[in-house]
Amino acid sequence: MRALSARFLRYGLVGAGNTLLGLGLIFLFMALGASPVVANALGYGLCIPASFVANRHFTFGGRRGSPAKFVAVQAAAYGANLAVLGSLLSVAPELPSLAQLAGVAAYVLAGFLGSYHLVFAGAPAATSRDRSHGDRP
């Protein structure tokens, strides 16, 4: 259980760093003239690969994982976010901030569990030989 807690903490640290990177990119693209929606899409789109690499190496100890599965897990986690957000807003529309926080919690938990059980589960760590020959997970 302790190792799982440590991984969850590392996952949160990667997420916090990735959020800062994403916001920086979003604001940069807006400063360069992109609309907020385009800037948002570019920021998120550019941060998904960074999140995959950081989680692969820092959170999951270099385990091989599928980038496609990672994107699918993140999409499902976002769906969980929207489901929680929508559900809470339908019963307590006067508490949108609380609904947002609960949605974020659902996103983080779903993203971590999906990454742990589906993306990086049972995958061996990449060896130094794999990395030196440019093999991709």
Image (cartoon, grey):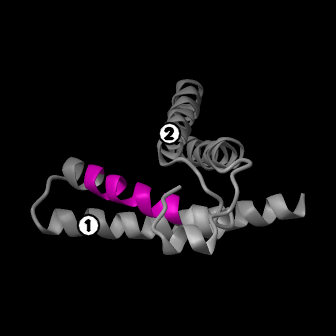
Instruction: Please report the residue visible at 53 percent of the width from the left and 71 percent of the height from the top.
Output: 131
| Residue 33: quadrant of the picture | bottom left
Front one among 36 and 90: 36
- Look at the image and say whether residue 49 sits in the magenta stretch: yes
Quick check: 51 above or below 116? below
Residue 131: assigned label: none
Front one among 61 and 82: 61
Residue on which the image places disc 2: 78
Q: In the image, 24: left or right of 11?
A: left
Which part of the image, by quadrant, shows the N terminus?
A: bottom right
Q: In the image, 67: left or right of 37?
A: right
Give coordinates of residue 54: x percent, y percent. Answer: 54, 67
Q: Secondary structure at mark 1?
A: helix
**Residue 14 appears in view:** no
Q: Amino acid at mark 2?
A: Tyr
| Residue 12: quadrant of the picture | bottom right
Give coordinates of residue 67: x percent, y percent. Answer: 49, 48
Instruction: Please report the residue visible at 47 percent of the width from the left and 65 percent of the height from the top.
Output: 18
**Distance Cα–Cα, label 2 vs label 1:** 22 Å
Quick check: 35 above or below 96? below
Give coordinates of residue 39: x percent, y percent. Answer: 23, 56
Which residues make up the magenta segment? 41-53
**Residue 56 appears in view:** yes
Which mark is in front, 2 or 1? 2
- Marks 2,1: beta carbons within 8 A: no
Q: Amino acid at mark 1?
A: Phe
| Residue 129: quadrant of the picture | bottom right
Front one among 56 and 92: 56
